[in-house]
Amino acid sequence: MKILMAEDDTTSRLLFGATLRKLGYTVTAVENGQKAWETWKQDEYSLLISDWMMPDIDGPQLCKMIRAEPSLQYTYIILLTSLDSKGSYLEGMDAGADDFITKPFDEEQLAARLRVAERILALHKKLHIQATHDRLTGVWNRAAIMDHLEEEVERAACQSTCIGVVVADLDHFKRINDTYGHPAGDTVLQEAARRMRLVLRPHDRIGRYGGEEFLITVSSCTGSDAMILAEQIRNSISMEPVDSRSGEISMTVSLGVTVGGDRIGEDTGTLIAAADKALYRAKIAGRNRVEFLNLK
Ligand SMILES: Nc1nc2c(ncn2[C@@H]2O[C@H](COP(=O)(O)OP(=O)(O)OP(=O)(O)O)[C@@H](O)[C@H]2O)c(=O)[nH]1
């Protein structure tokens, strides 16, 4: 695990860094709060050990700054202090610290406290995944993909780029459930999600929007980029049947595509409504096809 350490005293920084490395951690050691803040922002460390008293930004201030920053992963913060009064502990905790280590530190106690930190961080990661992912298919859940879309629309507005929105809906899925059973339907959903993920580029995201409906965000793209991707998805879904316990099941998907976000007034609702309308056209036109709706 990577640890960011901020300590202005050189001897203490070297000693602490060497001990942490000996315990098997990868350490980035910096000499003040400002450098710690800049380093943390660049690389979002999940564990920070910070001295309490440092010039400019001190430990509690650094805690407050990190806690005020919306970030994907939790940062577990341990404050290093030679202060041991009740008031200091309370101030540190209120600032957002999770634990304290009093200097001079005891190596065994340090190792034990770091094990606690790792346990809490692992739990946090597990809860975060459960809260943001769809259990059946493993892709993002509806709330998470919607949050992401909102961020992407804001980013597109700032950078004057476009965001593509694709709504993909498996065809005649009720028939698949009715013919092969609900568990086989689940297998089809899982395989469909897996195939779609394989086609996406690194910055694109997919989430389960409804039962057999998926929402895909295509970052910084033109209409034709989004259409090409949607066509690749359509192909990958229909290319070969899904192997299930109830036998081989053929599946197809219909997709609605739009792009926007580079002009004021195009919010997530407008984009999804447009992609949905395009999807409806694809269904009406016979399914297993991609339709585009231009917002301009
Ligand atoms: N197996 C399974 N089925 C689901 C799940 N969620 C929703 N469904 C089913 O998905 C089916 C969706 O049916 P419809 O909305 O009629 O759509 P469709 O049959 O795909 O028809 P078109 O979209 O018009 O092509 C329903 O029968 C739902 O019960 C799920 O998690 N697992």
Image (tube, helix red, strand yellow):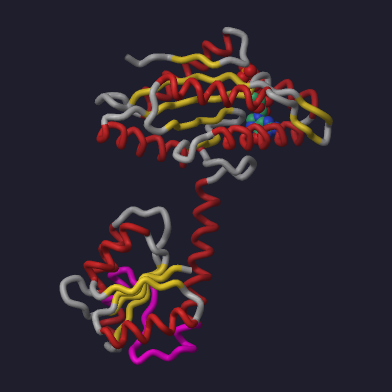
Rendering coords of residue 36 (x, y %):
28, 68
Check if residue 37 falls in the magenta segment.
no
Q: Residue placed at 44% from the left, 80% from the top?
A: 20
Q: Can you tell me which quadrant of the image ligand 1 is in?
A: top right
Where residue 168 sits, quadrant-wise, is top right
- Residue 63 against residue 211 in the figure, above or below: below
Rendering coords of residue 12 (x, y %):
31, 86
Q: Looking at the figure, which quarter contains the C terminus?
A: top left
Judging depth in this view, the residue of 73 and 238 nearest the camera is 238
Taking the view exactly as shown, the residue that stands out farthest to the left is 56
Q: Residue placed at 31% from the left, 32% from the top?
A: 156
Number of numbered discs? 0
- Residue 100 against residue 242 in the figure, above or below: below
Q: Is residue 134 left or right of residue 258?
A: right
Rendering coords of residue 55 (x, y %):
17, 76
Check if residue 95 falls in the magenta segment.
yes
Judging depth in this view, the residue of 127 and 54 nearest the camera is 54
- Residue 289 against residue 76 in the figure, above or below: above
Q: Residue placed at 28% from the left, 70% from the top?
A: 95
Judging depth in this view, the residue of 118 and 236 nearest the camera is 236
Q: Which residues are magenta?
A: 90-111
Q: Is residue 151 left or right of residue 87?
A: right
Rendering coords of residue 93 (x, y %):
32, 74
- Residue 151 against residue 278 in the figure, above or below: below
